[in-house]
Image: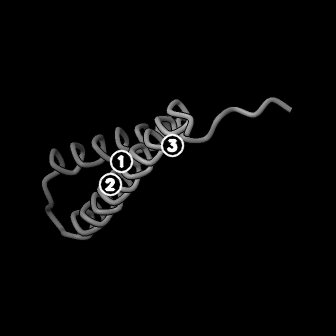
Amino acid sequence: MNTSFDAAMERNEILRLELEVIKYEHRDLDDAITVLQAKPGSDQLTLRRLKKRKLLLKDKITHLEDQITPDIIA
């Protein structure tokens, strides 16, 4: 078979798996942030760090989705 095609398919599969892991972590952070925000007197520094990490993960998600989905010029 075409080895470059196989390599591209394998790369896409790796990217998809990485994307799923990052999405899962993003959802976990969202849940943790929600719980912390509901607690009175929660640590604001921790909350800010979690939100910053969540934003970084969102950027990674967008980047991976762009790599997986090729640009189609109409």
Task: Tell me which residue sits at (35%, 61%) in the image.
Answer: 27
25 vs 46, left or right, is right
In the rendered image, the quadrant that contains the C terminus is top right
Q: Position of residue 63 (x, y in %)?
A: 48, 35
> Spatial distance from mark 2 to mark 1, Cα to Cα?
5 Å
Task: Tell me which residue sits at (21%, 64%) in the image.
Answer: 36
Instruction: Using the image as rendered, state which of residue 1 and residue 48 is in the foreground.
Output: 1
Give the residue type that dot 3 points to: Met
Res. 18 mark = 1
Q: Residue beneath label 3, please? A: 9
Q: Residue beneath label 2, please? A: 21
SS category of the residue bearing label 2 = helix
Contact between labelled residues 1 and 2, with CB atoms less than 8 Å apart: yes
| Label 3 packing within 10 angstroms: few (<14), some (14-19), many (20+) | few
Instruction: Using the image as rendered, state which of residue 30 and residue 42 is in the foreground.
Output: 30
SS category of the residue bearing label 1 = helix
68 vs 15, left or right, is right
SS category of the residue bearing label 3 = helix
Task: Tell me which residue sits at (18%, 68%) in the image.
Answer: 40
Q: Earlier in the sequence, mark 3 or mark 1?
A: 3
